[in-house]
Amino acid sequence: MPDTSSQTPLRVAIAGLGTVGSGVIRLLDTNRDLIAARAGRAIEVSAVSARDRSKDRGVNHQRFHWEDDMAALAAREDVDVVLELVGGSDGPALALSRATLAAGKGLVTANKAMIAHHGLALAEAAEARETPLKFEAAVAGGIPVVKGLREGTSANALTKVYGILNGTCNYILSEMEATGADFAETLGEAQRLGYAEADPTFDIEGIDAAHKLAILAAIGFGARVDFANVRTTGIVAVRAADIAQADALGFVIRLIAEADAQDGRLLQRVRPCLVAKDHPLSGVDGPTNAVVAEGNFSGRLLFQGAGAGDGPTASAVVADLIDIARVFENGGEVGAPFSMPVAQLAPLGPADSADRLERTYLRFTVNDRPGVLAEITAAMRDADVSIESLIQQGRGSADGEVLVAMVTHEGPERSVAKALELLEGSESLTAAPLVLPILPA
Amino acid sequence: MPDTSSQTPLRVAIAGLGTVGSGVIRLLDTNRDLIAARAGRAIEVSAVSARDRSKDRGVNHQRFHWEDDMAALAAREDVDVVLELVGGSDGPALALSRATLAAGKGLVTANKAMIAHHGLALAEAAEARETPLKFEAAVAGGIPVVKGLREGTSANALTKVYGILNGTCNYILSEMEATGADFAETLGEAQRLGYAEADPTFDIEGIDAAHKLAILAAIGFGARVDFANVRTTGIVAVRAADIAQADALGFVIRLIAEADAQDGRLLQRVRPCLVAKDHPLSGVDGPTNAVVAEGNFSGRLLFQGAGAGDGPTASAVVADLIDIARVFENGGEVGAPFSMPVAQLAPLGPADSADRLERTYLRFTVNDRPGVLAEITAAMRDADVSIESLIQQGRGSADGEVLVAMVTHEGPERSVAKALELLEGSESLTAAPLVLPILPA
């Protein structure tokens, strides 16, 4: 193995100098020698581009060539790999990514939305030019879980991939748990502290987690990315009272993204779930992410760490660069972005989950009047839902609203759906019931 | 990217057909198509060798060429990669490994003892021939932690690597915790259940964990493997009473392997430690393994899963084969076994830890007579050890033996050592004191 110093450096262009872009520059500066030793050659930034040249970013980027036109980075002769850190599923990020791969250069991106929507087309473009496309930072920040599934569990047929993929939701839910505060208040606090964005829709509605899940599912199950069929429920409807009830029953509430492939169909869901306190995911608090992969030989593997932040995200971005520097020389093979060539990824249709068995937490907000419990329990009986435990909470509010929470025995999803159908339009209910599945042990 | 079917298969020889070897064959059979899709070509076993040809191993190996002489596998023309699954740091395993690399073939091994003792020399041989040497299965069974440190955290300077690396000890300690039984009884039960070997010395004395730690430390810190300087304490002295005391104080006891590199020196230790119940490692029960890596940009990463067993170990072995199949074609680069070329690994000397600050659990077994507590606490005072809490346990045994357990405030290791020195030879003590560090949060 030749000495590092004799090797040509890997030359990188950075598009986007927000927190992640600046973090990458800081990381490349701070760990320069170590990175060169591990990569087998230096990694050097040639050129950068961002919207506003004059903005202070806390790192010195004046030493790099500046391109006003982001897309021009792909055409530069002094660039081997483009880092796309602009964000957004389409627009400039996608245009730059396409141009980069078309030019036969490597592409590293942290853009989960773009990979969830256009990952297959980009992977095909990368394959056509035998150039690397890597996106470790797109899923779970600094946790090497794209690599973990693509290479670590590569010998396994996975039975299941699931985890906590959105730090904002996990922060809000674990704060609600710790403080007893309600959702809106906790979201406001999270925004003040920088754990939630000014427009938190993508996070709290579960869309961000769905982007990441679609990517993991494709890699884990060798399936075509199918973001459109991720069934997604956010955390907006979870109340402080639900978290208290869950706690009393031995559970915490977490936004769980989960996927499995059975009978040639892919089931992908993002939902708040009850997680038993002895499950490894129950201890995942704050903005931490965690992914569980269950393989037919490996058994259950857990990957856990910081799901966001400039440092962890930069760590993932530069790990991709080091991988590329190690193998992408003289046209060396870098492997398929989704673990196998796009043509071999299975076009798995979306699974129907109506017959899937699960235990369920149901919470009803009801008027405090006689007969309400009888009405609810009759609907359960008629839909064949077996109740394991039921708690009616005393009047909490001045308007006479009462909470009825229950946990069902394991039964098919369709039964719970039927029970809710039977109760639809009931004057006893003051709001839509909340249905939270219980994560299996 | 060409179709799989057009590629020549990767041809493998297996040395050793114990549980792991048989597991590898079963895995290659079970997941054949999936492995070919991910590897870009088929992985086929050409030849096998083991001590006893006639032994029933639960898998059909009659279809492969049989070599009576294991070393002959390395010379076969129909072999690209040899799997060394024989075990033992020297002897036939080492001879075969040397012959394999000298022949320019790839080597995949699950042999932690051999890599801990001879990993550098083998890596040099691999580098000289530009052939792959991989050993994911040598550390933490099915958890892709060698890859995690070598590639996942490659952009980081690590501040610390630590974890639970021996499933036998973890099984025994968590069983003692669950049942209240003492060490000897639990070891016997573990042996009956197959969680401990007939001769459990390597496991319960911490040597197995030390092998694995030395490997992780080399990769994580870019240091030369230095097994000889892993300071190792086993779990034999841990009593049921210690586990009960730890529990009362909010801790569990786990055998922790930990390494850090400071000021150009490497500190490597394997010791039973008190782990706070809210630390992620406290929930790691039974034969599970877990590794924490703390990087200067990634922050804290946790990898957890099955630390042993034929399935998980085979999963790691075949992941290595898939990596090799992906890149090891036409002389493609596979990267340095220890993350950087051997010549660039730093020869870090062993660190002195006397000035390191830690909180410590101390347990004395004493005669039940006046003045004992005064003698112990005086020694603590004279050595400048500050006591945070102290419990004297009522007479548990007929012989008047009493336990005194205490937790110190954070202080230098040397102070505790001095206190013990002051108490050496004291007639109040009926056995050597037990000293367990408390793992920092």
Image (spheres, coloured by chain):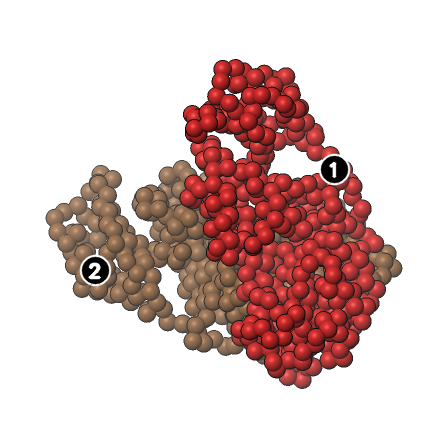
Chain colours: A brown, B red
> Secondary structure under badge 2?
helix
Which amino acid type corresponds to the residue marked 1 in the rendered image?
Answer: Ala
Counting from the top left corner in percent of width and height, residue B157 is at 71, 46
User: What residue is at 52 percent from the left and 18 percent from the top?
Assistant: B373
Furthest residue in direction front, as rendered: B399
Considering only vertical position in the picture, is B115 above or below B161? below
Furthest residue in direction right, as rendered: A6
Q: Quadrant of the C terminus of chain A?
A: bottom left
Task: Name the residue tied to disc 1.
Answer: B351
In terms of depth relative to the viewer, which is nearer, B233 or B92?
B92
User: What residue is at 73 percent from the left and 34 percent from the top?
Assistant: B352
In terms of depth relative to the viewer, which is nearer, B406 or A313?
B406
Furthest residue in direction bottom, as rendered: B6
Considering only vertical position in the picture, is B360 above or below A241? above
Considering only vertical position in the picture, is B7 above or below B300? below
Counting from the top left corner in percent of width and height, residue A371 is at 12, 51
Residue A131: quarter of image:
bottom right
Q: Counting other residues with Cα less than 10 Å from the Cα at mark 1, is it few (<14), some (14-19), or many (20 or more)?
A: some
